Image (cartoon, helix red, strand yellow):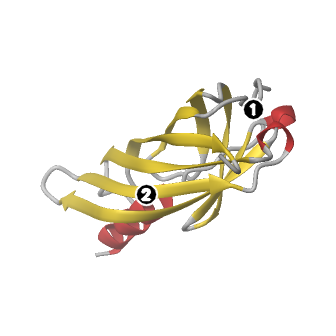
Amino acid sequence: MRLRHFVVTGAVAVAGIGIVAGSAAAAPTKAGTESFTLTQSFTGEGGTVTASGVINATGTDVVVSPSEDLFDFGAAGSVTVFHSPIATSAHFNQHTCTAMIHETGRYTFGNGTGAFAGYSGSGTYRVSGTGTNACSETGPTGTISISAKGPIVPLGD
């Protein structure tokens, strides 16, 4: 039971997408489609995030709360991301000691600073992860992948 609670709690925490202290990137100058990709440890929060599209940057995911993250692109600025799940599933197999999570949801971002001031966006995200060795006291090992995609526009457009 403890592990099942851990896996479900982990799935909810992982839904958060956020970033801190990465390489500087060029500021967005137009509307378009933005993609974010994050890979992290099965039991961790945050991690390295890559943005591509209008924003091309790498940073670190900072989880602020279960529904809010900060994408900080270092000297280029940051954006706040709010997210909510649409569907979440978690499965634990006692015989193979594996845990799996999947989630889909929607996000919006704004509150940009630096080069990202004046932009907003929204879209959908998908979380997928598999953990092995899930019967151990230290919890499962493995990776979780998060991908998000949607439009980014200057405010007022």
The disc labelled 2 sits on which kind of residue? Arg
Circle 1 Cα neighbour tier, 10 Å, few/some/many (<14 / 14–19 / ≥20): many
Instruction: Examine the rendering and report whether any part of residue 132 can be seen.
Output: no
> Is 29 drawn above or below residue 2 in the view shown?
above
Going 68% across and 27% down the picture, which residue do you hit?
Answer: 57
The crowd level at tag 2 (other Cα within 10 Å; few <14, some 14-19, many 20+) is some
Which quadrant of the view contains residue 59? top right
Q: Position of residue 157 (x, y in %)?
A: 65, 46
Q: Residue at position x 35%, y 73% from top?
A: 5
Query: Residue 125 versus residue 62: which sits nearer the camera?
Result: 125
Regarding mark 2 in the picture, which secondary structure is present there? strand
101 displayed left or right of 145 = left
The reply to whether residue 104 is visible in this rendering is: yes
Q: Identify the residue at the far bottom of this view.
A: 1
Residue 24: which quarter of the image? top right
| Residue 96: image location, x then y, percent | 16, 49
Q: Earlier in the sequence, mark 1 or mark 2?
A: 1
Circle 1: element type: loop
Question: On the picture, is 152 further left or further right than 99?
Answer: right
Q: Residue at left 55%, top 32%?
A: 32
How far is disc 1 from disc 2 in space, using C-alphas? 24 Å
- Residue 106's disc is 2
Give yes or no for contact between labels 1 and 2 (Cβ–Cβ under 8 Å): no
Identify the amino acid type marked 1: Gly
Q: Dot 1 corresponds to which residue?
A: 22
Q: Residue at x 55, y 68 (%)?
A: 66
Q: Is residue 20 left or right of residue 127?
A: right
